[in-house]
Amino acid sequence: MPAFTRHYPHWPPSAPKSLTVPHTGIHFNLEVSAWRYPQKTATTYYGGLLSYARLAQEVDALAGFLQQRCGVARGDRVLLYAQNSPPSSSSATTPSCVPMRSWCRSTP
């Protein structure tokens, strides 16, 4: 049995064994959700609620920071070094950023 299917005997019968790649990107999907459901909760973290509208604002703020402070341009590859948590998924905390063509570090 190939390595990537060895878990199949333990897989829930009703769960799909593969995912279809969507035709739209994550940022577009967030924009649509923020437009359709601005006040709905996008994520809950330690009792704090973050709406789709607020998440979209924070993502846009992080993108602006990367462009204005780090010089990131369309097509640049960027590594974000941050804790794997909802606050880090937007700009609630300012993560370190490493554009592949130059170094940029921001600390709160």
Image (spheres, rainbow, N blue to C red):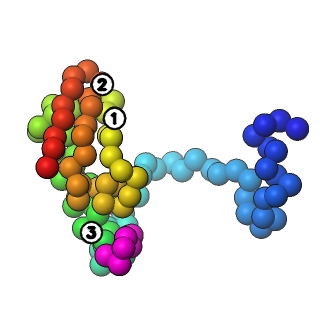
Q: In terms of sequence position, does the residue under pointer 1 or pointer 3 come before the other? A: 3
- Residue at 24% x, 67% y is 54
Are discs 1 and 2 less than 8 Å apart at CB? yes
Q: Quadrant of residue 1?
A: top right
**Which structural element holds mark 1?**
strand
Position of 79 compared to 6: left or right?
left
The residue range painted magenta reads 43-49
Q: Which mark is residue 79?
A: 1
Pick whichever of labels 2 and 3 is earlier in the sequence: 3
Tell me where residue 69 appears, x and y as whole percent. 11, 37
Label 1 vs label 3: CA separation? 25 Å
Q: Main secondary structure of the magenta part?
A: strand
Residue designated by label 3: 53
Q: Quadrant of residue 85?
A: bottom left
Residue 35 place in picture, x, y as percent = 31, 69
User: Three-letter amino acid code at disc 3?
Assistant: Ala
- Disc 3, SS: helix
